[in-house]
Image (tube, rainbow, N blue to C red):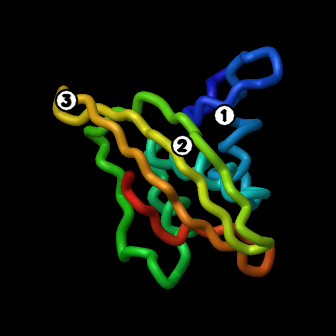
């Protein structure tokens, strides 16, 4: 079993397998059921360098032309700090993602905004905290 990079654990605090966690969204063709799950799967996609998934889950109004993850960045862990459902179609997720680039550790602390259109969640943008 390969543990999911998003760090999700089951009720016994054991790591959840990638295939039954973010893998079903990144490679399995399923849509994430909520914004937090989408954010976790996008983190896993950064870890595993899945640019196509990152672009497909980015809202078209804010999507860049490219989203190629830096293969030299080593992602070290994810902490979801909060998840707020604003209404049926809008949500926010605050998280901290730790990483290392060029031997130097750093962290990305962001409050991300998500929108649900026609039953599918999309990342819109984020505010660095």
Q: Are marks 1 and 2 in contact (CB under 8 Å)?
A: yes
- Residue plotted at (38% across, 51% down): 129
- Residue plotted at (59% across, 53% down): 93
Give above or below for 14 relative to 60. Answer: above
* Label 1: which secondary element: helix
Q: Is residue 80 left or right of residue 47?
A: right
Give above or below for 98 relative to 24. Answer: above
Residue 1, image quadrant: top right
| Tag 3 residue | 104
Q: Position of residue 49 (x, y in %)?
A: 43, 47
| Tag 1 residue | 18
* Label 2: which secondary element: helix
Q: CA distance from mark 1 to mark 2?
A: 9 Å
Q: Nearer the viewer, residue 85 or 67?
A: 85
Which mark sits nearer the N-terminus, 1 or 2?
1
Viewer-nearest of discs 1 and 3: 3
Residue 63, image quadrant: bottom left
Give above or below for 44 relative to 60. Answer: above
Q: Nearer the viewer, residue 31 or 33?
A: 33
Give above or below for 49 relative to 35. Answer: above
Q: Position of residue 60 (x, y in %)?
A: 52, 81
| Tag 2 residue | 44
Viewer-nearest of discs 2 and 3: 3
């Amino acid at each position: 079993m390969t543990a999911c990079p998003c760090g999700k654990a089951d009720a016994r605090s054991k790591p959840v397998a990638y295939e039954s966690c973010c893998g079903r969204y990144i490679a399995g063709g399923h849509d994430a059921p909520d914004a937090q799950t989408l954010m976790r799967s996008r983190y896993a996609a950064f870890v595993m360098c899945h640019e196509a998934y990152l672009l497909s889950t980015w809202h078209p109004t804010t999507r860049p032309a490219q989203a190629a993850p830096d293969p030299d960045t080593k992602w070290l862990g994810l902490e979801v700090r909060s998840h707020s459902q604003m209404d049926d179609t809008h949500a926010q997720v605050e998280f901290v993602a730790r990483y290392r680039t060029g031997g130097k550790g750093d962290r990305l602390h962001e409050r991300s905004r998500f929108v649900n259109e026609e039953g599918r969640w999309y990342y819109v943008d984020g505010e660095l905290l």
